[in-house]
Image (tube, grey):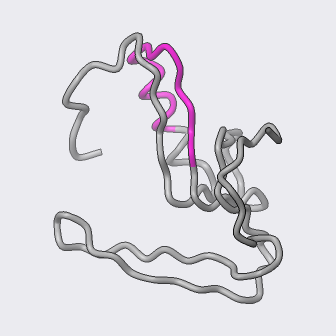
Amino acid sequence: MTRDLDSSIEGKAVILVEDILDTGMTLQYLLKLFQQRKPKHLRVAVLLDKPDRRIAPVRADYVGFSIPTNSSSVTGWTTPNATGTCHTLAFSHSEAASRKKLRRNDGS
């Protein structure tokens, strides 16, 4: 991380939002770091989840799309961020990634 939080999250409900949850290594690090700040609740929301690629034992509380490893069709786009660098977001355009409402990972 190149910058710390601007305010305290102690006692607050926090949702960590990620674009892609892949191996889970980054998320595992961030969750440990944020847990040390003692939030009341710490939840994770991801747009794209790749559970087949998981190395670290983490899971998202809210998942937009679950992407199987064997996805045959991939669509992507690139968006510039505030620093001028670009991030590419890719996702499967298959049955497994059909458009659905954001759902809790516990099935609700």
Q: Quadrant of residue 65?
A: bottom right
Residue 100 coordinates in the image, percent (x, y): 72, 62
Residue located 24% across and 73% down the image: 85
Residue located 19% across and 63% down the image: 82
When the figure is inspected, residue 85 is found, relative to residue 49, above or below; the finding is below
Looking at the image, residue 67 sits to the left or right of residue 39; the answer is: right
Q: Is 42 or 30 nearer to us in this picture?
A: 42
Residue located 43% across and 77% down the image: 88
Q: Which part of the image, by quadrant, shows the N terminus?
A: top left
Q: How many marks?
A: 0
Direction front: furthest residue: 101
Residue 77 coordinates in the image, percent (x, y): 45, 83
Say whether residue 71 is magenta: no
Residue located 25% across and 67% down the image: 81
Residue 71 coordinates in the image, percent (x, y): 77, 80
Tell me the magenta residue range: 29-45
When the figure is inspected, residue 14 is found, relative to residue 40, above or below; the finding is below
Q: Is 97 or 54 nearer to us in this picture?
A: 97
Residue 28 coordinates in the image, percent (x, y): 56, 39
